[in-house]
Image: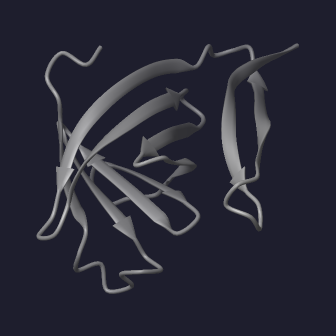
Amino acid sequence: MKKTLFNAVLSLSLCSSMSACAASLVIEVPDTPEPRKETVVYQCSNKTKKMRVEATYYDTDEFGLVYLKWNGKRIIASNVVSASGVKYVGGEYTWWTKGNNATFYDVINDPKEENFLDCIKEKNTE
């Protein structure tokens, strides 16, 4: 048997800004072990902008995913190898956490990773 980990509704832009459609993404994972789910809100900033990022983590001993939402955007990123902390990559984005802190990179618009967002976990976001 498989269990649905989560349904993510992703807004897909079409050619016209007036028209849009929605799609569902279902990721099935084995029943055992039961995925751990935690939603954390971060306050992020760099030299030019501030934003709020909501991260929902889905973890087992075998895999890790994070569903990130910010400024009307949404991505799903997968856990990858890191020297320190926990690193997730999805599309052009890298989300790297350690303790109550995270860094958020857009490697397409900032390939040298010089203009990343520094993020700190909001208190009492459980």
In the rendered image, the residue lying farthest to the front is 18
Looking at the image, which residue is at 76% across and 40% down?
A: 22
Looking at the image, which residue is at 59% across and 37% down?
A: 63
In the rendered image, the residue lying farthest to the right is 1
User: Would you place residue 50 above or below residue 69 in this image?
Assistant: below
Percent of width and height locating residue 108:
47, 80
Quadrant of the rendered structure where residue 111 is? bottom left
Looking at the image, which residue is at 53% across and 38% down?
A: 64
Percent of width and height locating residue 26:
78, 31
Percent of width and height locating residue 66:
50, 39
Model colouring = one colour
Percent of width and height locating residue 124:
18, 15
Q: Quadrant of the N terminus?
A: top right
User: Would you place residue 126 above or below residue 96 in this image?
Assistant: above
Q: Nearer the viewer, residue 119 or 88?
A: 119
User: Would you place residue 55 above or below residue 3 in this image?
Assistant: below
Q: Nearer the viewer, residue 18 or 84?
A: 18
Quadrant of the rendered structure where residue 10 is? top right
Q: Nearer the viewer, residue 122 or 3?
A: 122
Q: Nearer the viewer, residue 36 or 93?
A: 93
Quadrant of the rendered structure where residue 65 is? top right
Judge left or right: residue 11 versus residue 50.
right
Judge left or right: residue 80 versus residue 1.
left
In the rendered image, the residue lying farthest to the bottom is 112
Looking at the image, which residue is at 29% across and 14% down?
A: 126
Count the marks: how many? 0
